[in-house]
Each structure stands twice: as C-alpha cells, then as structure tokens.
Amino acid sequence: MAKTMAPQKATGPALDPGLVRKLLTDMLLIRRFEEKAAEAYALGKIGGFLHLYIGQEAVAVGATSALRPDDYVISAYREHGHCLAKGSDPKRMMAELFGRRDGLSHGKGGSMHLFDKSVNFLGGHAIVGAHLPVAAGVAFAIKYEARDQVIVCYFGDGAVPQGEFHESLNLAALWKLPVIYLCENNRYAMGTSTDRALAQTQIWKFGQTYGIPSEKVDGMDVFAVRDVVGRAVERARRDTTPSLIEADTYRFRGHSMRDPAGAVYRTKEEVEHEKERDPIALLRQRALAGGALTEADVRAIEKDVSDRIDEAVAFADASPEPPAEGLFTDIYKEG
Ligand SMILES: Cc1ncc(C[n+]2csc(CCOP(=O)(O)OP(=O)(O)O)c2C)c(N)n1
Ligand SMILES: [Mg+2]
C-alpha cells in the first residue's frame, strides 16, 4: 500500500548552529561557483553547454545532508550543485568546466559530464531520463551485494513523460530497490511548462501508481528537503524501500547560457515573484532570526566561500590544456 502525504514544510525545534553553518556554506558555494562559471563563460573560458542550478540549491544541499559519504548520487546535466554538495573539489570541477587537464574528467567531459568516484558522484548525464535506469541498476547492485548504501537520483520534470521514468519506478518498486527518485520540478523543461507536457502535474502522485512512498516538498526550504529525504533514506537503508519525492523549486536563470534569462516563456513578474523564495535568503533570515548565526558569522562564511571560488578559478586558469595524444585515450575501439 503506498503511503502518500500532502506537501510538507519544516517546523520545529531551534536550529543547530553547526548544521546551519554547513548548509549555508554549501548553498553559497554552489551559488558563487555558478556565478563565476557564468562570468567565465562570457569571457570565452568555457565552451559548449552550461546549465545553471541557481535557485535550486536547497534541494541538493538538503538532500545530501541526509546522506552518508558512501551513499551514491546520480544526476542529469544541471548537476554542478549535486556534485559540489556531495563533496567534490571545486577546483577540479571548475577545471573540468574550463576543459583543462586537471578537471574531474581530465577536461574531456565539461559541464554536463562531471563524475567523481572519490565521493560516489556518478554523473552528469545529458540524455533526459537516461540515468534513471542506471540508478535502479546501482540500487540493484547494492541490494545484491547486501550493502546498506542508498542512491539518490535527481532528475527534472522533463524526464517524467519519458518511458525510462516509468520503467525505473516499476522495477524499483517490483524488486524493492534502495533508490530515492528525487524530481526537481522547476516547472519548465527548456521552454515547455509542465502543464503543457504532463497529464498529471502532481508528479509525486506517480509513486502511488507503483505503490511506493511518495511525497511533495517545498524545494526552497533546505530543512524540509533534509527531513523528507532523511525519512526516505531511513526506509531505503532499513528495508530497501524505494521512494519518489517531488521538490517544488524554480530556476532563476534560463535553461542554459543560450537562454540567459528564460524570458520568452515566462513573465518577468513570475521570475521576480519566485525570487522572493530564494532558498539562500530564506535560510540566512531564519538563521539570523533564530540566533543560530550572527551577521558577523554570515560575513565570515561569505568571505570563506568567495576565497574558495577565487582559488578554484585560479586553479582552472593555471591548469594546462589536455595533451593532443589524449584524443586517443579513454575511448572504446575494436581490435
Ligand atoms: C532524450 C532527450 N530528449 C531531448 C533532449 C533535449 N533537452 C535537453 S534539456 C531538456 C529539458 C529537460 O528539462 P527538465 O528535465 O525539466 O530539466 P531542467 O532543465 O528543468 O533542469 C531537453 C528536452 C535531451 N537532452 N534528451
Ligand atoms: Mg525542469
């Protein structure tokens, strides 16, 4: 029998200053990393695609805060935030965006193909929906080998009408796999709004069809995300129960650098209204109001983050281009 619940908001006890500091630091790290990446793109230092996660930081940070370091994460192409939150090195990530030798994938993957086995971050997948079955496969391996890890699979609302979404949920439910499918519903797949693409826009309800626990959460509230994912992780670890979570969120920038503001398919008023729910501003306000952090603490966190991002850019700038002979390595070939 599927357990289903109405949208959740975090309420409750006083905030733990150590936790607040960690969550705010991680969210700011993502935001500043991407602001610098956007600048570097404009300067021609980054080529190809670049999809910014700005506005959605509470989802990656809240979810990761409920995981153990040895748990797995897999994502689509808007994955800088998921990779950073999982603990990857911003220097090697920035070098990857710059296409340099010291990048996570030695400069061969770029923005959409970050991968970092050292923190169990399994990509960075550019084909919409294609990594959902991979997540089921990883969860199958965990169960087959009787390990107690879990995998969180992030995906966008654009993957929901794809066959892979339904095939993956079906197998995860049927074989009872320790996978948490976490849909970041930012209301658009490129320029197509969910109400133009989905027969059922309450995405969490698809979990009911497959008989798995499913919930919707305010994706701008980092504590609400942490709570919902925490419950899903507990179920997955305890008895390999899969879950579907829908996080209600919004991307403040356009789809990619070729659509910088996303102004063609959404109104300026809508974007401005959503920016009032800025997850970083909300956490900062809550931390100050509750006394978990002082203004001076916040300034110190801001300074530390901005130093780390400057360091990442300097590292990427200094890293050499990949060698020409690198063209013939890391490839599959006959004979
Ligand atoms: C199978 C497939 N079809 C089409 C595309 C082109 N495409 C790239 S991003 C995208 C939209 C995906 O939107 P969503 O899943 O909501 O993610 P978001 O960009 O909102 O993070 C599409 C259709 C693709 N990459 N893969
Ligand atoms: Mg979307």
Image (cartoon, rainbow, N blue to C red):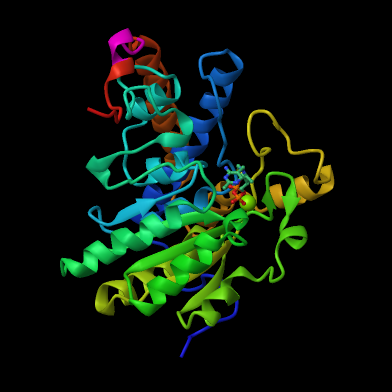
Task: Pinpoint residue 174: horizontal percent, then vertical percent.
Answer: 38, 79
Does residue 93 appear in the picture of this structure? yes
Does residue 13 appear in the picture of this structure? no
Q: Which of 180/21 is in front?
A: 180
Q: Is 241 displayed left or right of 39 in the figure? A: left
Query: Within the image, what quadrant is residue 314 found in?
Result: top left
Residue displayed at 26% across by 72% down: 237
Residue displayed at 69% across by 71% down: 200
Residue reaching furthest to the bottom:
1
Q: Which of 114/307 is in front?
A: 114
Q: Is 147 displayed left or right of 210 in the figure? A: left
201 magenta-colored: no
Q: Which of 119/278 is in front?
A: 119
Q: Is 44 displayed left or right of 98 in the figure? A: right
- What residue span does the magenta drawing correspond to? 321-326
Residue reaching furthest to the front:
335
132 above or below 216?
Answer: above
Query: Within the image, what quadrant is residue 100 found in?
Result: top left
Residue displayed at 55% across by 42% down: 53
Task: Pinpoint residue 89: horizontal percent, then vertical percent.
Answer: 31, 33
Task: Pinpoint residue 216: horizontal percent, then vertical percent.
Answer: 57, 71
Q: Quadrant of the C terminus?
A: top left
Q: How many marks?
A: 0
331 above or below 54?
Answer: above
Task: Pinpoint residue 21: horizontal percent, then vertical percent.
Answer: 39, 48
253 above or below 139?
Answer: above
